[in-house]
Image (tube, grey):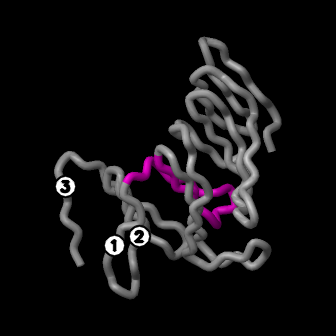
């Protein structure tokens, strides 16, 4: 099945394990091999990122975070290949999001920096790092960079 190409729309194609994703602006599609076509997964997503172990994608919008399992997970919590979980809904807009390791994410809103586990059994544990005024975060080489009110903070040896 063909997918019409829209002018002035950014397209990205990403392949992870046996999953083919197509990004069309703020829409994310997954190729359905049995139907031989792309099926829409998300309407208003912002970005996705591969986990350090290469087995999961985090997909997020302005107010939600989802985890897409790229292959079967046999340890707890067990997951099927292609399973999607809605990890959390945020009351504040999510600005930046990074994998800390394959089991934890770090993200910021306009007022706070949080770490969340991706194990959704029972209740997702979310930890507040600190309150900052309009923080911008960036994670690189096990260092967390936080820019707030013209000051740069660096946290080193992030696991």
Q: Residue furthest top?
A: 150
Tell me how far mark 2 sits from mark 1, CA to CA. Answer: 5 Å
Quadrant location of the C terminus in the rendered image: top right
Q: Quadrant of residue 83?
A: bottom right
Secondary element at tag 1: strand
Above or below, 20 against 86 in this view is below
Q: Which residue is mark 2?
A: 30
Which residue is tagged 3? 6
Residue at mark 1: 38
Label 3 – label 1 distance at C-alpha: 15 Å
Q: Are marks 2 and 3 in contact (CB under 8 Å)?
A: no
Q: Residues within 10 Å of mark 2 (few under 14, many from 20)?
A: many
Q: In the image shown, does 129 or 81 lie closer to the viewer? A: 129
Which residue does the image show at 75% across and 64% down from the upper left?
Answer: 122
Q: Which residues are magenta?
A: 44-61
Magenta stretch: includes residue 4: no
């Amino acid at each position: 099945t063909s997918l019409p190409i829209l002018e002035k729309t950014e397209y990205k194609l990403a392949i992870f394990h046996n999953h083919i994703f197509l990004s069309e602006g703020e829409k994310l599609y997954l190729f359905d091999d049995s139907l031989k076509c792309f099926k829409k997964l998300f309407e208003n997503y912002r970005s996705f990122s591969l986990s350090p172990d290469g087995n999961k994608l985090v997909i997020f919008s302005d107010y939600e975070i989802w985890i897409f399992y790229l292959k079967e997970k046999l340890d707890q919590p067990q997951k099927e290949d292609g399973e999607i979980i809605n990890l959390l809904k945020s009351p504040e807009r999510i600005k930046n999001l990074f994998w800390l390791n394959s089991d934890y994410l770090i993200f910021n809103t306009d007022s706070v920096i949080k770490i969340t586990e991706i194990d959704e059994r029972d209740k997702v544990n979310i930890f507040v790092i600190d309150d900052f005024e309009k923080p911008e975060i960036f994670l690189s080489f096990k260092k967390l960079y936080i820019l707030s009110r013209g000051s740069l903070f660096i946290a080193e040896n992030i696991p």
